[in-house]
Image: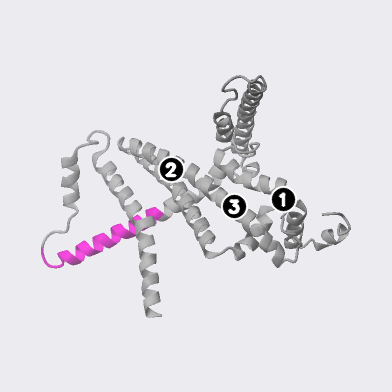
Amino acid sequence: MGGLLTELGKRLTERWMSLLVLPGALFLAAAFAAWTLGHAHAVDLDLLVGEAQAWRPAPGAGAGARLAVLLLVVALLAAAVGLVAQTLGSLVERLWFAADWGSWPRPLRALARWRVARRRQRRAGAVAAYERERRRSGELLASGTPGGGTDLGPARLAVARVSPEEPHRPTWSGDRMHAVTLRLARDLDLDLATVWPALWQLLPDAPRQQIETAREALERATTLVAWAVLYAVLAVWWWPALPLAVATYVTARLRIRSGVDAYAALIEASVHVYVAELAERLHVPAQGVVGRRTGWEVTCLLQGKRHLIDLTAHEPQ
């Protein structure tokens, strides 16, 4: 038991350092540079080093203790800044995925509605271009033209870049997550929000670990956006913080996009692979193939609506 607690404490310390203290310490260093140098001496390293040395405890009795206290205070301040970034990152995630944009305050809601409409127009244009390419490819094949047919991959990719399904959210990331819900409802008549908590209990350790890892990577990416915002605030007093904020934001945006895609794909694949086992546990006859009837019955049972299944028991599956 002692070894287990020691290992657990070690892992918690590592996570505390990597997620809070180290990023917070870097931000405190940038803040110190902003406070010391300002715009007038933005890249004066000699001034920065001299000011930093002034904070070093004077030699003599108790210098080591004062240095330890200073380092402890810096670590606590860094952790506090890290917690602020984590909290801001949660807000960024909520805004980025915009699942509840219909309940946002009026200015934000109007902006989100405009974005959704704009994205629907863009997707409609991309779909129309894909259909034109598909018809052209069919005509070339029908005419027997040598090398007839065209590569439809770029046209399909252009549609997916806008949204994998009809846009309902103001961002690509929000629609990528929502597309999983839409496809499962359309193909299996299954409500993901209802089924996922029960399905999660059945997942083996390997897919569960993959999903947790993808979710943590997504949280870190949204927290990186929060750090970009904090560095942008420093740019008011110290201009070198601005390119740092821009680089951080670009990195975060790329990570969010790839992280959302991986997370959504893992969830959708897990549902398709393990929903038959969930149906079996709930005594829903799947007969080897999970169809719309099976998905609907699983959803009804988990929602406590078995009476709906009893009412339609005479209908063919």
Q: Cα distance, mark 1 to mark 2?
A: 34 Å
The magenta region covers 60-82
Magenta stretch: dominant secondary structure: helix
Identity of the residue furthest to the left in this view: 60
The answer to whether 184 appears left or right of 172 in the picture is right
Disc 1 marks a residue whose amino acid type is Leu
Foreground pick, 26 / 159: 159
Q: Which of marks 3 and 1 is nearer the N terminus?
A: 1
Q: Provide the residue designation for mark 2.
A: 252
Q: Do the residues labelled 1 and 2 touch (CB within 8 Å)?
A: no
State the residue at coordinates (44%, 51%): 220
The quarter of the rendered structure image containing the C terminus is bottom right
Q: Is residue 25 within the magenta segment? A: no
Q: What element carries label 1?
A: helix
Identity of the residue furthest to the bottom in this view: 1
> In front of the other: label 1 or label 2?
1
Q: Cα distance, mark 3 to mark 1?
A: 13 Å
Foreground pick, 116 / 287: 287
Q: Earlier in the sequence, mark 1 or mark 2?
A: 1
Q: How crowded is mark 1: few (under 14 residues within 10 Å), some or many (20 or more)?
A: some
**Do we see residue 100 in this rendering?**
no
Q: Provide the residue designation for mark 3.
A: 269
The quarter of the rendered structure image containing the N terminus is bottom left
State the residue at coordinates (53%, 61%): 208
Q: Residues within 10 Å of mark 2 (few under 14, many from 20)?
A: many
Q: Is residue 68 within the magenta segment? A: yes
Q: Residues within 10 Å of mark 3 (few under 14, many from 20)?
A: few
Q: Are marks 3 and 2 in contact (CB under 8 Å)?
A: no
